[in-house]
């Protein structure tokens, strides 16, 4: 059964580790993440962007696929199905469709509008037992057409949103989606420390743009209160690389190598290896 992310993130915050949010795109992706979590006895969050939700047919299709896989694969670790960077309208749609967690990203609104809309999402989500992530300070980079300028969040604004009673809070600290440019100057740990101090030490903080952040920065972010880390692009890159190698090696032209169950297998295994690597790095192994 899908669960809200509240309990797993409260435990992660207390235990000084982080739970990974891995974005899913299709059945192979979902199966890879779920089985890796089960094999490593780790809690996990499945992230679905609005674009990915549409790609998979819609939110009901996603809920049906995830629930079905969990039952058939006998997944017993805590799994949360979470809307990633939800719009105001999108948030209400997933609450209705059966997600167990929702991010309302109002970071592109002014703080007052962000507060008002976040409040309404919280009310609807909590009535149905979902966890809620809100965001302050847009994450840089581009994700599914949503382009953010890479702001650094204001701790006072973070407190205003945290005080609404959100389950977890995403704050921009120089992190961006996708691969980091060569001239990236790193995470703003001074701001992260300030945010943690201002919002209170029990609030699980969320680090977006997990792809390409060096391991030592991940470890430091966790010591400063990050309890949820989002990873998307890295899984896409290893999937594409493994699939390309299979085709460049001519394997699709040998025997029944064109069978999608064979063609997609190396990419599937690459996602599993990447997710395991991140679970070890984040410290969530054996925390289910
Ligand atoms: P990356 O694609 O950079 O890993 O970011 C993922 C993310 O933050 C999803 O919200």
Image: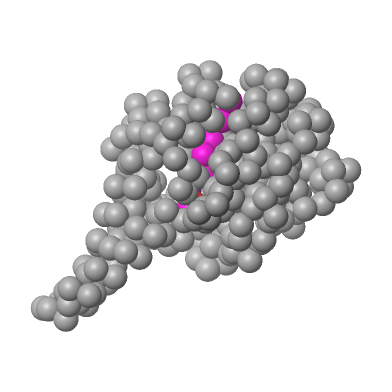
Question: Can you say whether 182 is above or below 102 in the image?
Answer: below
212 vs 131, nearest the viewer: 212
Horizontal side, residue 141 vs residue 62: left or right:
right
Q: Residue furthest left?
A: 255
Q: Main secondary structure of the magenta part?
A: strand
Q: In the figure, is residue 243 to the left or right of 211?
A: left
Residue 88 is situated, as x and y percent measured from the top left of the image, at 75, 54
Front-lying residue, 225 or 3: 225
Q: Residue at x 44, y 40 (%)?
A: 214
Question: Does the segment drawn in magenta span residue 46?
Answer: no
Residue 157 seen in render: yes
* Quadrant of the rendered image containing residue 48: bottom right
Q: Residue at x 34, y 47 (%)?
A: 274
Height in image: 248 above or below 42?
below
Q: Bounds of the magenta span?
A: 225-232
Choose between 81 and 111: the one closer to the eye: 111
């Amino acid at each position: 059964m899908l669960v809200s992310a509240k309990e797993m993130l409260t435990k992660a915050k207390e235990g000084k580790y982080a739970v990974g949010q891995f974005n899913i795109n299709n059945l192979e992706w979902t199966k890879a993440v779920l089985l890796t979590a089960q094999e490593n006895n780790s809690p996990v969050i499945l992230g679905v962007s609005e674009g990915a939700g549409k790609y998979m047919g819609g939110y009901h299709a996603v809920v049906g696929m995830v629930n079905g896989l969990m039952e058939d694969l006998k997944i017993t670790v805590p799994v949360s199905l979470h809307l990633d960077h939800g719009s105001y309208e999108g948030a209400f749609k997933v609450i209705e469709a059966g997600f167990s967690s929702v991010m309302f990203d109002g970071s592109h609104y002014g703080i007052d509008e962000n507060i008002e809309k976040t409040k309404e999402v919280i009310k609807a989500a909590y009535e149905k037992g979902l966890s809620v992530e809100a965001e302050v300070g847009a994450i840089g980079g581009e994700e599914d057409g949503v382009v953010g300028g890479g702001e650094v969040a204001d701790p006072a604004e973070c407190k205003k949103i945290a005080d609404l009673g959100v389950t977890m809070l995403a704050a921009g600290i120089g992190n961006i989606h996708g691969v980091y440019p060569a001239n990236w100057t790193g995470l703003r740990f001074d701001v992260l420390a300030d945010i943690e101090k201002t919002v209170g030490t029990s609030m699980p903080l969320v680090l977006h743009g997990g792809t390409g952040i060096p391991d030592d920065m991940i470890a430091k972010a966790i010591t400063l209160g990050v309890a949820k880390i989002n990873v998307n692009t890295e899984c896409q890159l290893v999937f594409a690389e493994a699939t390309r190698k299979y085709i460049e090696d001519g394997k699709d032209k040998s025997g029944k190598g064109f069978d999608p169950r064979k063609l997609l297998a190396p990419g599937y295994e690459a996602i599993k290896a990447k997710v395991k690597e991140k679970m070890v790095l984040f410290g969530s192994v054996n925390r289910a």
